[in-house]
Image (spheres, helix red, strand yellow):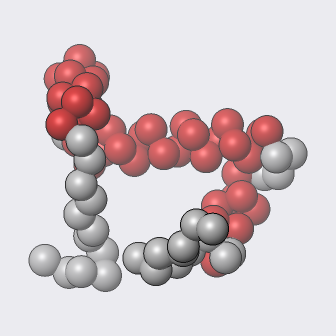
Amino acid sequence: MDINKWKSVAINITDYKLLKGLCKEKYRPPGQMISKILQVYIGLQAKKNKKTVENFRKKLLNGDNNDDGARSKKS
């Protein structure tokens, strides 16, 4: 599997069961459901921040929020 194209994440079991339930109801595999949920959420956040979806996506992909695994310490 290409690690530059695919990533795995750990979620708690309750959220996993909810995801599986949504997938079954909407006839989507988990990966597609997560993508759909993200797209809807990004649209809502872009509207809230008064930005276009494309500009908000670029900010998330290229901005300071893209640490790709680096953890910040809370004070």
Question: Is residue 62 visible to us here?
Answer: yes
Residue 7 coordinates in the image, percent (x, y)? 27, 68
Which picture quadrant has residue 3? Answer: bottom left
Q: Residue at x 78, y 39 (%)?
A: 47
Q: Which quarter of the figure is the N terminus placed in?
A: bottom left
Specify the farthest residue to the left: 1
37 and 18: which one is in front? 18
Q: Is residue 6 left or right of residue 44?
A: left
Q: Is residue 15 above or below residue 53?
A: above
Q: Which quarter of the figure is the C terminus placed in?
A: bottom right
Q: Residue at x 23, y 63 (%)?
A: 8
Question: Is residue 23 visible to us here?
Answer: no
Q: Is residue 71 left or right of residue 26?
A: right
Residue 27 coordinates in the image, percent (x, y)? 21, 26
Specify the farthest residue to the right: 50
Q: Is residue 21 above or below residue 40?
A: above
Q: Residue at x 61, y 46 (%)?
A: 42
Residue 33 coordinates in the image, percent (x, y)? 32, 38
Which picture quadrant has residue 34? Answer: top left
Q: Residue at x 28, y 33 (%)?
A: 15
70 and 3: which one is in front? 70
Q: Is residue 67 above or below residue 18?
A: below
Q: Is residue 25 above or below residue 19?
A: above
Specify the farthest residue to the front: 75
61 and 71: which one is in front? 71
- State the count of labels: 0
